[in-house]
Structures are given as C-alpha cells and as structure tokens.
Image (cartoon, rainbow, N blue to C red):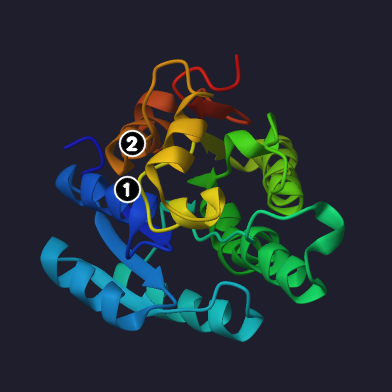
Amino acid sequence: MRLAGKSALITGGASGFGLGIARRFAAEGAQVLIADLDAEAAETAARNLDCHWAEADVASNASVGNLAYLVADRLGDLDILVNNAGTTHAPAPLDEVSEAEFDRVFAVNARSVFLTARHFIPAMKSRRAGAILNIASTAGISPRPGLNWYNASKGWMITATRTMAIELAPFGIRVNAINPVAGNTPLLPAFMGGDTPELRARFLASIPLGRFSEPEDIANAALYLCSDEASLVTGVALEVDGGRCL
C-alpha cells in the first residue's frame, strides 16, 4: 500500500499505459480518477478498478477546467497528476505530414501538459506538495525516422518536465517523466504503420532486451516516481526501454 491515503488523476487512463498505471495505483491504495476522451472505456475501467472516472478532452482548456472541478469534488486535494494521454501521426516523411495531424499531435501531447499545469498546479503550490509524472517516450531522445513530429512533441515533453521540476521545486512539487519504448498498447500499430509480423520484427530489432514494453513495466516505474520513496527525485526522464537508447 505504497500510495495509501493519496489521490491520483491519470489522463488517458482507460487503456494502454494509463490503464496499467491506474490499476497499479489503485492496488497500492490510491484513490484514482481516470480521465479519458473515450467515456465508455473510462467508465468500464473505473468500474473494474472501483475508482472514479470522467470524460475529458485534455487538449481543451474548458474540458480540463471542468475536470479540475470534478477532481476536487470526487478526490479532494490532488496528490498525483499523471499526464499520460498521447497520440501520434502515421509514419510518413516529415514534409508529408498534414497540418491537421501536426496540430492534433501537439494539442494532445504538449498543450495538454500546459493545460493541466494551469488548472492543477495552483492548488499544489498552495499545499506545497504534489507529484507530477509526464509519460514521454524514447522517441524524444532517440528519434525514429518517419515519426518526426511525434518525436518532437515528446522531446518537448522531456524539456517541459525538467523546466517544471526546477521551477516547482521550491513549492515542494516533484516533476518527473518516463520514456517508454514502443509498447503493447492500442497505439502500437499507428507507430509501426500497421501490425504485421514483419513490422513487429523490425521494431523489436532496435530493442536490445528483445521485447516491447508492457503497461505493467511503465506502471512499476510510475509507482516509484510518484511514491514517497522518490521524495528526492525530480527532473528525471527515466528510460524504461529495454536498452533502446543505449
């Protein structure tokens, strides 16, 4: 029960890494709220985990503002914020990605972090406590060709994590990130441009330990970074990547 007595908001928590984190946090005693654009999936996940849920568009200021009211009503003071919601564009040469795809990637992967900061950090500052975790990617430090603007959005997130950490440290707020390697999540086919044995083999060839990440791998790292055991850890972008970035 390493998170007993703590409350946690997990964006994009209805599937993939977010659901793995929600499951682990709930098992460790946290009071969890799953926020997701897919309301049906969020409700199902929350029912299975006996936690709270909310429909939210993390790229919308109005939606995130409403989410802040819901979190305060259902959880009270927020101890842990996990910015997990993310998306990508299909693999393509950088000059062939559409403006709409570019805008969508940066709205979900970057603007969302800005918006949750606006709506949740003031209360954390007042309490002089809190842990924020951003789910970035190995793509932010070891880019794959064809995913240029996704890579850039995750590089932004890593830099945002470090600058948030240094600014918020005087308020007792820790900010860290996790850089997962490609994982068995609903986004995997989008990263690979399909899902065939050949595409999987090509991706796996770049991972020295020879397997994709699993939601449980990321949840284990998230648990440590958001727990009191990591009380002296801030500004870290932890690679959970099977050696991908070596």
| Placement of 23 over or under 69, stated as above or below | above
| Placement of 210 over or under 23, stated as above or below | above
**Between 175 and 211, the one nearer to me in the picture:** 211
Can residue 143 be seen?
yes
* Residue 112 horizontal side relative to residue 205, left or right: right
Secondary-structure class at tag 1? helix
Q: Residue at x 37, y 49 (%)?
A: 17
Q: Residue at x 70, y 35 (%)?
A: 143
Numbered circle sitting on residue 223: 2
Numbered circle sitting on residue 123: none
Can residue 170 be seen?
no
> Which residue type does callout 2 highlight?
Leu
* Residue 207 horizontal side relative to residue 55, left or right: right
Q: Quadrant of the C terminus?
A: top right
Q: CA distance from mark 2 to mark 1?
A: 8 Å
Q: Residue at x 71, y 47 (%)?
A: 146
> Do the residues bearing badges 2 and 1 touch, measured as CB atoms within 8 Å?
yes
Locate residue 63: give its quadrant: bottom right
| Placement of 175 over or under 96, stated as above or below | above
Q: Which residue is mark 1?
A: 21
**Between 2 and 204, the one nearer to me in the picture:** 204
Q: Quadrant of the N terminus?
A: top left
Residue 231, image x and y in percent? 45, 27
Residue 238, image x and y in percent? 53, 27
Q: Residue at x 32, y 48 (%)?
A: 21
**Between 20 and 118, the one nearer to me in the picture:** 20
Q: Residues within 10 Å of mark 1 (few under 14, many from 20)?
A: many
> Which residue type does callout 1 highlight?
Ile
